[in-house]
Amino acid sequence: MNRERILSREVNATQIPSGDKQLLPSGSKVFIHQTLGGSYTVQTDFGLFRIDGVDADALGEEVKDTAVKGATLSDGAPDPEAIWGQLRQVFDPEIPVNIVDLGLVYSMDVEKTVGPAPESKEGYKVNVAMTLTAPGCGMGPAIAEDAKNKILLVPGVDDADVRITWEPPWNQQMISEEGKMKLGLI
């Protein structure tokens, strides 16, 4: 597979590792390094960038359907396994292991909510506490936003809050066995 591409149109991208947003112009030459979790990590003459999957067509790739099907419980609540599945689709653009297997997700809970009167409609909010491999990681907000957007695709989820925390500090012992195998740590 040829990993070198020319952007067919301009795309919004996130610079790695700063997390700064930048517009990559049409005609830019890029080299695809990683295609995990529906996003692309590309190298340009100006460094590494992350391009979201919705812009895959600009790379000559197919835009994939991201809908999550059949993922509600009998009471209409979102299926926690579907939420965990979505979190396993979130990757740090520099590490080929998802945030769950990296041990970055500390907690996930589904909370029943009630909207304002007069409708007082019931719904479900997902709360996630996660960390990063390093406190200075500029990609933190982009990774958290990716997690939130993927959670919101689960049927039954009305809202999501993904919060970055530094307690307890992350360490390599938190990586799952599968993650350690992918990283060559065992």
Image (spheres, rainbow, N blue to C red):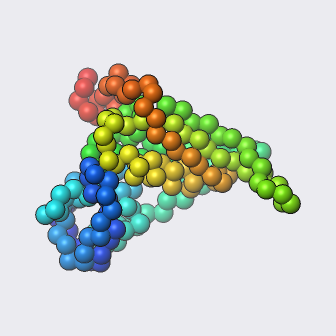
Q: Residue at x 51, y 50 (%)?
A: 148
Q: Is residue 76 left or right of residue 154?
A: right
Q: Is residue 65 above or below residue 87?
A: below
Between 64 and 90, which is closer to the camera in this rendering? 90
Q: Residue at x 25, y 75 (%)?
A: 25
Q: Residue at x 77, y 45 (%)?
A: 75
Between 37 and 14, which is closer to the camera in this rendering? 14
Q: Is residue 94 left or right of residue 131?
A: left
Q: Position of residue 145 (x, y in %)?
A: 46, 52
Quadrant holding the N terminus = bottom left
Q: Is residue 112 above or below residue 35?
A: above
Q: Farthest residue in the left direction? A: 45
Q: What is the tally of numbered marks visible in this picture?
A: 0
Between 21 and 2, which is closer to the camera in this rendering? 21
Q: Residue at x 26, y 70 (%)?
A: 24
Residue 72 visible, this orientation: no
Residue 153 visible, this orientation: yes
Q: Is residue 131 left or right of residue 27?
A: right
Quadrant holding the C terminus = top left
Quadrant in the picture for residue 176 = top left
Q: Position of residue 131 (x, y in %)?
A: 42, 35
Q: Is residue 26 above or below residue 95?
A: below
Quadrant in the picture for residue 7 = bottom left
Q: Is residue 5 left or right of residue 128?
A: left
Q: Position of residue 162 (x, y in %)?
A: 52, 44
Between 52 and 57, which is closer to the camera in this rendering? 52
Q: Position of residue 113 (x, y in %)?
A: 74, 47
